[in-house]
Amino acid sequence: MSSPDCSFADVLLCVVSQASEVSRSRGGSLVSRAGNGLISAVRSHKQPDSVPLAYNDKIVAFLRQPNILELLQERQPSLARDHTLREKIHYIRTEGPQGVDKLSCDADLVMLLSLFDEEIMSYIPSHSFHPGLSFSPRCSPGSSPQSSPGLQRARAPAPYRRDFEAKLRNFYRKLEAKGYGQGPGKIKLIIRREHLLEGTFNQVMAYSRKELQRNKLFIAFVGEEGLDYSGPSREFFFLLSQELFNPYYGLFEYSANDTYTVQISPMSAFVENHLEWFRFSGRILGLALIHQYLLDAFFTRPFYKALLRLVTDLSDLEYLDEEFHQSLQWMKDNDITDILDLTFTVNEEVFGQVIERELKSGGSNIQVTEKNKKEYIERMARWRVERGVMQQTEALVRGFYEVVDSRLVSVFDARELELVIAGTAEIDLNDWRSHTEYRGGYHDGHVVIRCFWDAVERFNNEQRLRLLQFVTGTSSVPYEGFAALRGSNGLRRFCIEKWGKITSLPRAHTCFNRLDLPPYPFEPCCCMRTPHRCGGDQQPLVWSEEVRLLFFFFLL
């Protein structure tokens, strides 16, 4: 018999690796970061603690500002003209927190609150605010919360939105109500795996805006007959996102912080027809969003802000280039008099050639001082985000909004949009197991199932993602966790079914999130490292010699 080190986990991982290879080639950044001569430093500052206020009370106080409609007009003109929404604002101003409770699931209100979430969360009245005490909606401007002399804005870190799930439900509800992806027309993409990018580009770009928004989506892989009950579609978006957003093709590059988050590459300008490719990328993001498919791609925070047409600031650079962010943050926090010798210029290195660019007209002759450093930092931050990618970004955003209405997407902030598009890459094994169902005689205590989960427990996160992709067609988990996995007709749990003979290979049904696992024979093994995982005082189990040989020949 072969070594007991070849455990269930090892064999299972080999099968998954053979069936679904998700690792991608990593390309280097084509453009090096700017050498600007700044001193890199990190300064930690505690955020001021906010006064503990009930969230509903903050909403009421914020909406009772006399200029609330002016603020709304400035932030989102289309909503400011909505007579129904005006009535709901007036209702809350009159009824107070009870009015918020009654409208807590209202889609229009959720959208409104998401636009001002930061401002609402940072409201700090100087006086005690009793939950049962409400301001008069007819109070004078001089006594309004906004104009109270003790009232100030604080930079309180926004928590994860407790209303995000409500936003998500209402977002999909509105998509359905407006007919997104409902048909009766169809978008049927015929995909050749060997020409995935070019074939998809030619087909998707041939459809009109209305067709992309309204028609149902069907995917068919050439030579692979079968109906699309969402399995092929999920695999399509998974494979396409791996190709399209891979830095190898030149449209995107890895961020300076890591080799998994990507951003638009300045060198994409040298790619033929690059603006249409970015418009196509935006359409793919939009299609994945309205049809509720996750993408196997993780973008930088400024990328999502650009999708939402939000202004970036210094804090966003932390997700783009941590070292660059630290340099500018140090400048902001310290007196630079007689320390830094800088002008309003920046050096770019392209293909080994250093080019000096001015951040403003005549910038090479303007010295950076303590007095004007704020402008310098703002221009440097904007340059780092936008350098060489403004046209590409505009093309991608245009393609995105050709598929989905910007007013619907504006309900999310950048962090939330990231979760909606890409899900999460970290797998919670307890959540996975607790939302798995069994068929054919298997159950959570069955010896095969115990050792299956024992194997998965010893996988690292990347290996777990490979297994998940093999069974479901995607390696991302919805924000809500495994309870929100989708199948051919809506929500469908991960499933393991007893199937086949001991000589059979495992198989997957991606449309139904189902793994068919044969009842392989197991043998006791006293050499296993984690005996407690296979069931109390029972001896740990491994695959038999015959099963190992079967998989060995399968992998050749």
Image: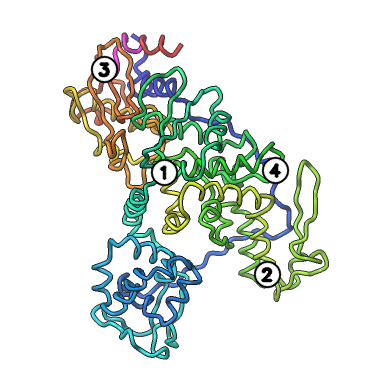
**Label 2 or label 4, whichever comes before in sequence order:** 4
Q: Residue at x 31, y 8 (%)?
A: 546
SS state under label 2: helix
Magenta: main secondary structure: helix
* Mark 1: amino acid: Arg
According to the picture, the residue beneath numbered tag 2 turns out to be: 375
According to the picture, the residue beneath numbered tag 3 turns out to be: 518
Q: Is residue 523 above or below residue 350?
A: above
Mark 2 to mark 4 CA distance (whole Å): 28 Å
Given residues 551 and 132, the one toward you in this image is 132
Of all residues, the one furthest to the front in this rendering is 184
Q: Is residue 60 above or below residue 415?
A: below
- x, y (%) of residue 192? 51, 23
Q: Quadrant of residue 62?
A: bottom left
According to the picture, the residue beneath numbered tag 4 turns out to be: 269
Given residues 79 and 419, the one toward you in this image is 79
Q: Residue at x 67, y 41 (%)?
A: 268
Compared across the picture, whether 441 is left or right of 255 comes to left
According to the picture, the residue beneath numbered tag 1 turns out to be: 214
Q: Name the mark nearer the viewer: 2 or 4.
A: 4
Compared across the picture, whether 362 is left or right of 187 comes to right
